[in-house]
Amino acid sequence: MRRIKELAGTVAALLIIIAPVTSAAPAAFADGSSEPRFTVEHAFGNAPGDGWQPWGSPTLLNGRLWGRTTYGGSHNQGAVIWSMVPGKPKTYRVEHSFGGRTKAVGGGMVADVANPHHDWLRIGPDGRTLYGAALWGSDGGQGGVFSFDTESRTYRVLHGFSGIGKTNPAGEADEGTNPHSNPVPIEVVDSRGLKATVLIGMTAAGGAEGSGSLYRMDLDGSHFRLLHSFVPAAGAVPHGFVIQRGSRIYGMTRLGGITPAASAFASAADFSNYAEGNGVVFRYDLNSGAYRILHSFSYAGPLATPSLPGGVVDGAVPDHGGLVFSNNRLWGLTTQGGTNGGGVAFSMKLDGSDYRINHTFGAPILAGDLSQPHGTLMPGPNGMLYALTSFGGATASGGVLRVNPRNGNYRLVYSFPAGAGGVDGIDNPVVTTDARGRIVLYGMTKLGGAVQSSLLPAPIAADWKLPQPAQANGVIWRLVL
């Protein structure tokens, strides 16, 4: 992964230099259309006036788009929550800067969380409160969960993590650490038969072995408890989120499960992407506490024989995303594996049977088919599923894809134009319709745009890399289909 990302950063930086500065993308559509249906709604600026480098996705709530960046804001590296009326860029505003001191739910001041990474902010049952998580910060320094009331603009830290992790080896065994994605409001039934909504999420570290956790808490942050500790043999280091079907929740882990043989890779650097396992799809029963692996990704390496019947190569390492239920099947994406190393789109029945590879993506870095999705297939009002990729497409800068859940057919919808138009499509789009009934997508690119950072941030994030500002700060975009 490290070698691929370094190459990607080099290519992205070059594309920013050579690509035209434009908010439209002639001939970037798969059907050859030159109509300017793609626009940049906002180019993220410099800290402290704005956030920069969004690693997540927007949320549409009560007539506004809401989202986060991973860096920037008044604390330089802490990031921001932003909002904007769709299609009206001048309404963009920063709602909260992460990384300082803030009020806790029970009163008093606590260290704020910082550096939110992936996924979209989740809407609470009151229809006004957004819930999210951040990778670092909080009093324990290991990230935490927060809420933001979009009407009163009230922000609160609900829980700070303190579990076992690489930066916290002496952490607590019954805690999580470093959540990469947000908790999900899920309806449960208590022992008295009463329904209640709680937050259920995952952390990439923490738990009994430091390999990640599945946790639960009330909407106000109370009654936190660990539901499951991940272990490498049965899936580890989840970077995504869970979905609910009845009393069961479904999700994926980024690593763990099957580890391919090092001899099936051309170099140790190539093998390092898979050395800790390919990841799994799992199911957890909220009533019984039973954990079950539905599918272990079986990618065996580029020099090995195909790992699935019929000569099909499985995917591996589902990074940042989750599953979606459509047409009586679970659908998902992997970031790596597949014939070309660029990941796959897959589907299966709820019990894990009838597993299918619906599309194998192209090779990372190269122009052509899209490559390396880092998110989730999102349902549109037309029944189609939409997602983004970090690489591939006409400019090797990623793009938008569509999968038809009725037959599994795949289509490359749009290639990001690179340069000021955006590089590295990250996580998921918002899919909606406009007044004319057209499908409209809103999303972000992690890099590209008109602004490069000129500031060195405060050392909040342990995974910060100095070359990142040179690749520009990313954009919010709009695409009309």
Image (cartoon, rainbow, N blue to C red):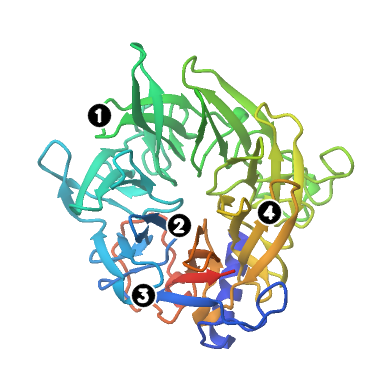
Per the model, the C-alpha gap separating discs 2 and 3 is: 17 Å
Task: Write the residue at 28% across / 47% down.
Answer: 128
**Residue farthest top in this picture:** 192
Q: Position of residue 378 (x, y in %)?
A: 56, 51
Q: Earlier in the sequence, mark 2 or mark 3?
A: 2
Numbered label attached to residue 89: 3
Task: Write the residue at 28% across / 64% down.
Answer: 458
The reply to whether residue 1 is in sight is: no
Question: Compared to 52, does 211 lie above or below?
Answer: above
Quickly name the residue at label 2.
57
Task: Write the residue at 59% across / 50% down.
Answer: 377
Q: Earlier in the sequence, mark 4 or mark 3?
A: 3
Question: Compared to 367, does 195 lie above or below?
Answer: above
Secondary structure found at label 4: strand
Q: Are marks 2 and 3 in contact (CB under 8 Å)?
A: no
Quickly name the residue at label 1.
222
Per the model, the C-alpha gap separating discs 4 and 3 is: 29 Å
Task: Write the residue at 49% across / 70% down.
Answer: 478
**Where is residue 170, by image quadrant?**
top left
Q: Left or right of 16: which side holds 83? A: left
Q: Left or right of 357: which side holds 374? A: left
Q: Could you tell me the amino acid type at mark 3? A: Pro
Q: Position of residue 432 (x, y in %)?
A: 49, 59
Q: Position of residue 208 (x, y in %)?
A: 44, 26
